[in-house]
Image (tube, rainbow, N blue to C red):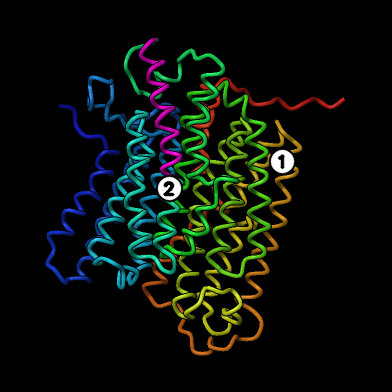
Amino acid sequence: MSSLSIVTIIELVPLLGVVGLFILPKGSTKLIKQFAIGISLLDLAISLLMAFRFDRGVSAMQFVESRNWISAFGIKYAVGIDGIALVLILMTTVLVPIVLLAGWNESEGGRWSPRVYYALILVLETMMVGVFAATDVFLFYVIFEAMLIPVYFLIGGYGRGERAQAAMKFLLYSLLGGLLMLAAVIGTYVIATNQIGSTFDVTALSGLHIDSATENMLFLGFFIAFAIKAPLWPLHTWLPTAAKSATPATSVLLLGVLDKVGTYGMIRFCITLFPHAAHTFTPAIIVLSLISILYGAFLAIGQKDINGLIAFTSISHFGFITLGIFAMTSQGLTGASLYMVNHGFSTAALFLVAGWMASRRGSTKIEDFGGLQRVTPVMAWAFFIAGMSALALPGLSSFVSEFLVLVGTFTRYPLAAIIGTTGIVLAALYVLLTVQRSLHGPTATGNESLIDLNLREKVAIAPVIAILVIFGFFPKPIIDVLNPASHEVMTQAGYVDPQPKAGK
């Protein structure tokens, strides 16, 4: 039997950690937390080794592994990564130990023990890595649906406020999308069986000959599921509720990583498997993307709850990501892929710092945080930098990805790029207004004795801030990894970058 791919090892380490968690003595809460963080750090180290061994000049899948799973239907455990999958897996393995350290006390007071809380997060880490690495469509679908289980229990068991309602709303929306995807998966399999035999291999399926009407239906089955997961307007309504009810750590994983499965799926499956349908629906998707950009920004401006604000800014940002994907240019696709990573880290910074602010103040209302710059300067500066990254300030990582998305879109759809640019103006409004109301001005009553970040919190937030700054000034390492994969996706889909027009 062939040896395990390093991708499979990255998937297995958190699962082995779950087994270890339940072997630890009962009541050893501190040891459980330390063990979970240690396992996540080990997984991070292995993923960094994988990144070091990754050949940046190759566009084909690397670290490939394929094993028979359900032979009668041609279903395999098949994994492999290109540049896009690599950066998303790295983002995942970096964020998990950060949220475990940052949310040290989040598991206490939940419906179940801290042991269950950390087990759910480690199981979720396995699934997040697996969904980005899956090259078998059926395997992808199984993991895509299975991810709902740990997230449902993390929100419903350890959240706050109307957590049961938020968890159920998230589950119902996701299940609806999953059912549509399942129908599309079955339809694709039936067509493949008639043409090339029983297989769910994404590379083999990309060569199918499908009539226009059928391809459009299959595309919609996948796309709607991914649009719910992303989420894209008007399928976004579960997100603000979930963000307000989930713990900060769960919110980071939900918006920072899980939602990227939707936009990643658009690249890996919608465009690759159904290029003609993607071309047909591109105008409509671009309109939805622009609505998401503007709608999310306008709603963010009017938010009084800080978690609601972050949720609506994310809806706006996902509009930019989808716009870059369906601009159908390699530059736009690279920008969208980079945006996924940058949004993951900027959202992580916002949710973590906002969670610390709320836990100290006992409130999530923005108006209750007035004057924090004077009382808790380190925490205020961390929130300020995260906010500046959210509005894509030059010198921070989000600027590069937003710039690439808009430039890549402009070369093919100039009007869409111009409309999308207004989202940058609105982002400046909702971020700067929030910074002014929460960090500056007179110190709000009740904030006089708030405590600044402790050592553990500083250690947790420091790498996130460092990433936002370093990749703001030097994004080349990530872009060099993404470019070959973006060109490969565009080539497989039959698109060629627009050539600049010579001046008259």
Task: Name the image quarter holding the N terminus.
Answer: top left
Magenta segment: does it hold 181? yes
Question: What secondary structure is found at the residue carrying circle 1?
Answer: helix
Q: Residue at x 51, y 64 (%)?
A: 350
Residue nearest the viewer, comparing 315 with 327: 315
Can you tell which quarter of the image residue 302 is in?
bottom right
Taking the image as shown, residue 420 lies to the left or right of residue 120, namely right
* Residue 37 shows in this picture: no
In primary-sequence order, the first of circles 2 and 1 is 2
Task: Name the image quarter holding the C terminus.
Answer: top right
Give the label on residue 172, or none: 2
Look at mark 1 in the image and give the residue it sits on. Answer: 417
Residue 267 position in % (x across, y down): 50, 33
Mark 2 or 1, which is nearer the eye?
Answer: 2
Give the label on residue 491, or none: none
Residue nearest the viewer, comparing 132 with 56: 132
Magenta segment: does it hold 239? no
Question: What secondary structure is found at the residue carrying circle 2?
Answer: helix
The residue stretch that appears in magenta: 174-194
Q: Residue at x 36, y 23 (%)?
A: 201
- Please tell me whether the stretch drawn in magenta is mainly helix, strand or loop: helix
Above or below, 476 relative to 209: below
Residue 412 position in % (x across, y down): 70, 31
